[in-house]
Amino acid sequence: MKFMLLIYLDPALMDALPPGQADAMLRDCFGHADALQRDGVLLQSQMLAEPGTARSLRVRKGRSQATDGPFAEAKEVLGGFNLIEADSMEEALRIAGGFPWAAVGSVEVRPVQELDAVRLRVGHAVGQRIHQIR
């Protein structure tokens, strides 16, 4: 089963860390991720740019509107993700616990739905092109 580990960070807690602590946490994170990748558990891992670089797109009544920054005001911001393979939610939570980010935010663990099964359920043949936003 695939699980998405969504990493949320509290910028105030990150800013309050002693000098060098954030880099030490990153080194721990990379070490954990490297071990998971060697074990075939970690499928993908990415860090996101600062929230101020984001744009949010909404389409209402056929009209598109893009706004600067993240959509919602929140104490914690999405900082990155890890896509993992685990046998259960309990195993996924154990794996998530190896990342240091819960100390300065949270790690949301969410099962990933297999899109091919959803495509079949809604009558959209597997392999059809997805429309891209231009």
Image (tube, rainbow, N blue to C red):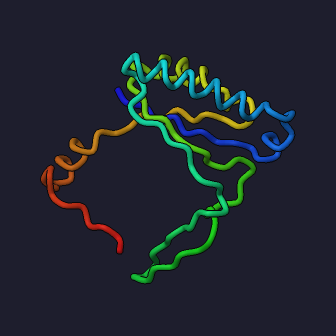
Q: Does residue 113 sit above or below 87 in this rendering? A: below
Q: Is residue 77 above or below residue 32?
A: below
User: 58 or 97, which lies in front?
Assistant: 97
Residue at image location 65% in from the left, 55% down from the top: 50
Q: Quadrant of the C terminus?
A: bottom left
Q: Position of residue 43 (x, y in %)?
A: 38, 31
> Residue 31 lies in what quarter of the image?
top right
Q: Residue at x 37, y 30 (%)?
A: 2
Residue 18 in the image: x percent, y percent? 87, 33
* Residue 73 at x, y percent in the picture: 71, 59
Res 80 → quadrant? top right
Residue at horizontal 27 percent and vertical 45 percent from the top: 115
Check the image and report above or below for 134 versus 102: below
Count of marks, rendered view: 0
Q: At x 60% / y 53%, what residue is drawn?
A: 49
Q: From the viewer's perspective, is 41 left or right of 57?
A: left
Q: Is 55 left or right of 36, judged from the image as shown?
A: right
Q: Nearer the viewer, residue 25 or 81?
A: 25
Q: Where does the N terminus fall, quadrant-wise?
A: top left
In the rendered view, tell whether residue 91 sits above or below residue 23. above
Question: In this image, 49 relative to 117: left or right?
Answer: right
Q: Position of residue 117 (x, y in %)?
A: 22, 41
